[in-house]
Amino acid sequence: MLLRARAAAKILPIAMGHRDEENLRRLTDEIGGRVTGSPEMARPWEWGVGAFSRAGVDVHTEKYTLPVTWSEGDTRLELPAR
């Protein structure tokens, strides 16, 4: 429990002083789409681990297997002329 309290003491001031919009912009504009099970799914993990590490938090990740993945395939949009 003491470890969690130390982590919270480091994270909370940073989180409270940081604008959520900046994190959202980075995740959507810089990192972009990340379909479950795709190689792109690793990018937000790397970003999150880096952000917490820079904040002084001891971070580790764990491997897991997704039994099912999804990919939308081709998408087409047609707009009628006015």
Image (tube, rainbow, N blue to C red):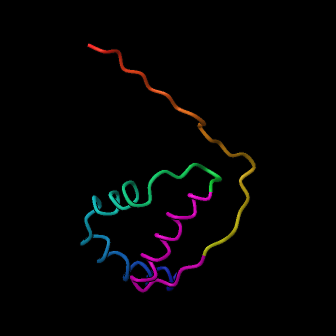
- Is the residue 28 above or below the residue 15 in the image? above
Please provide percent x and percent y for residue 40.
56, 58
- The quarter of the picture where residue 38 lies is bottom right
What residue is drawn where x is 75% and y is 49%?
A: 67
Position of residue 44 in the picture relative to residue 67 (left or right):
left
Please provide percent x and percent y for residue 9.
37, 82
Please provide percent x and percent y for residue 10.
37, 82
Position of residue 35 in the picture relative to residue 14 (left or right):
right
What residue is drawn where x is 37% and y is 77%?
A: 11
User: In which quadrant is the C terminus drawn?
Assistant: top left
Magenta highlight on residue 28: no
- Is the residue 8 above or below the residue 35 in the image? below
**Could you say which is closer to the camera, residue 5 or residue 56?**
56
What residue is drawn where x is 61% and y is 50%?
A: 36
- Is the residue 11 above or below the residue 22 in the image? below
Magenta highlight on residue 46: yes
**Could you say which is closer to the camera, residue 43 or residue 14?**
43
What residue is drawn where x is 50% and y is 74%?
A: 49
Magenta: main secondary structure equals helix
Looking at the image, the residue that sits furthest to the front is 81
- The quarter of the picture where residue 42 lies is bottom right
**Could you say which is closer to the camera, residue 26 or residue 61?**
26
- Is the residue 13 above or below the residue 21 in the image? below
Point out the stretch of residues depicted in magenta: 39-60
